[in-house]
Each structure stands twice: as C-alpha cells, then as structure tokens.
Image (cartoon, grey):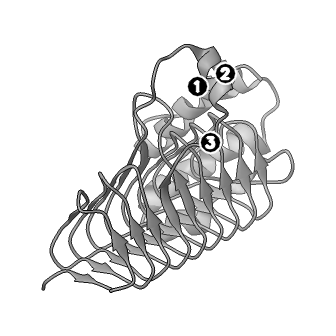
Amino acid sequence: MPRVVHPTAIVDARAELDEDVEIGPFCTVGPGVRIGRGTRLVSHVVVAGDTRLGVHNVLHPFSVVGGAPQVRADLRAEQDRGPARLALVVGDHNVLREHVTVNLSNGDGATTLGSHNLFMAGVHVAHDVVIGSRCIVANGVQLAGHVVVEDWVTFGGLSGVAQRVRVGQSAFVAAGAMCERDVPPFVIVQGDRARVRALNVVGLERRGVPEVSSAALRRAFGRLWVNRAGTLEAALAEVDVSDEHVGALVAALRRRAMRPE
C-alpha cells in the first residue's frame, strides 16, 4: 500500500517514510526521522530528532517521540563529554498511547525501545533508557535517565524508577512503587522505597516459563527471602543455579549487592 499523509500533517522532506506508513492529522515529522512500514501516527503526534521507528508501531495523539533530553545544558557541559549523539531507536509492533514522551539519547549511544511493548497514557521515558521487549508500562510511569528495563517487565500505574536502575526480566513493579535500587528479575516489588514482596508467579505463567523452572524459582525465592537466616551472600551460595532462570536471578542479585547504596 502507498504512504498516506494527511494534508494537515507537516513532514520534512528529509524524513524517510517506508511503504504503508500512515501520518494522521496535525502530525509533525522532522528531518532525519525514519519510519518503518505499516507504522501509524494517529493524529497530533510529534516525531523529531535522529529517530528510527521500526515496523507496525502505533503512536496515539499527543505522543512526542524524539524530543530533546530534559537535561540542563550547563550541567552537561560540566561532564566534559563533548556533543551528544541525540538518537532514538524504536523496534516493531509497539503501541504508544496518549501523551507518551520518549527522549533522545544524551550520550554516545541511543535511547532504545524493543518490540511488542505497550506504553499507556502519560508514560515518560527519559534519555538513554534501554527497554527490552514485551513490556507493559501502565499510565503515568516515569523512567529516569539511563534506566535499563529487561524483557517481559510489567509496571503498575504511577510507579517510578530512579536514574541508572535496572529492572530485571519478568519483574512486576506495583502501582505507585518508587524504585531507587535494582529490581531483581522474576519478583514483585512494591512500596516507597520499593522492596521485594513475592515471586511474580502470574508473570511467569503468562510468559510461558516451564513449570520445572517456576518450581526452581519458588525454591530459590524461599531460600533468599522467606527463610533466610544469615546474610544474602551465604544464601546465594546455597542456591542451586542449574536452572537458567535461577542462575539469572542469582547473577542479578550479586550485581545488585555490588552496587553502592
């Protein structure tokens, strides 16, 4: 199918639109933007900067993708790192609902979104954030700069993640949780400040994790959180890491323990 650009849309001549792209009313697409086939900008969407959108994404009204990082220029100058690349790479089959904002990178890399993600209304993704695939990010979630979100993560509404924090695969961040430390994979965290509350059993089932691995994770969770008598390091040494999911959990906890508070 041919590209469809509404007469009220403003598309810079230097933007690259693949086949079957639909640009709806009152959208703005800036120079340097590349949009993959089948991607749809519903209306009143802004795509700017060095931004690459993959295939079959849907951007809803008033989303702003590729906006400048929300970092003071004088603070960046103090870092003495030279000019930023200001890039954003978005994968395929993502849905960005109303008023989602995704900022360009503020460094040498790129802000990166994977594929098959849902970003509900009012989500903010700051500069240099890296998000995996098949994540659900509910209304009003705020992700600060340099956050890393692994695959299959679910965020409840109005939760937040501090800068440079990693959220592990298949974690569930409960509504309103404020995460200032790395979130281990496969667990539920809740509260201000967010702490581990339970194993994300529902998330494991929805992902299709084999029962043998789910059982191994339940045993590991019990040893590490429920029945732990000594130090975390001692408990980690006793956990059987022959299952790859348990191994990923233990590795994440070791990295987390090494990071300063």
* Residue 248 percent location from the top left of the image: 48, 38
* Label 3: few (<14), some (14–19) or many (≥20) C-alpha neighbours in 10 Å: many
Hey, which quadrant is residue 212 in on the image? Answer: bottom left
Tell me if 144 is positioned left or right of 86 in this view.
Answer: right
* Residue 232 percent location from the top left of the image: 73, 26
Q: Residue drawn at (40%, 39%), measured in percent from left and top?
A: 110
* Residue 40 percent location from the top left of the image: 34, 78
Disc on res. 259:
2
Q: Element under label 1?
A: helix
Amino acid carrying label 2: it is Arg
* Label 2: few (<14), some (14–19) or many (≥20) C-alpha neighbours in 10 Å: few
Q: Which residue is mark 3?
A: 184
Tell me if 164 is positioned left or right of 179 in this view.
Answer: left
Q: Residue drawn at (54%, 75%), measured in percent from left and top?
A: 97
Amino acid carrying label 1: it is Arg
Amino acid carrying label 3: it is Pro
The residues bearing labels 3 and 1 have C-alpha atoms spaced at a distance of 10 Å
Tell me if 39 is positioned left or right of 228 in this view.
Answer: left
Tell me if 143 is positioned left or right of 127 in this view.
Answer: right
Depth-wise, is mark 2 or mark 1 nearer the camera?
A: 2
First reached walking from the N terminus: tag 3 or tag 1? 3
Hey, which quadrant is residue 122 in on the image? Answer: bottom right
* Label 1: few (<14), some (14–19) or many (≥20) C-alpha neighbours in 10 Å: few
* Residue 5 percent location from the top left of the image: 28, 82
The residues bearing labels 2 and 1 have C-alpha atoms spaced at a distance of 7 Å
Residue closest to the far right: 192
Q: Nearer the viewer, residue 58 or 176?
A: 58
Q: Which residue is mark 1?
A: 255
Pointers 2 and 1 in contact (CB under 8 A)? yes
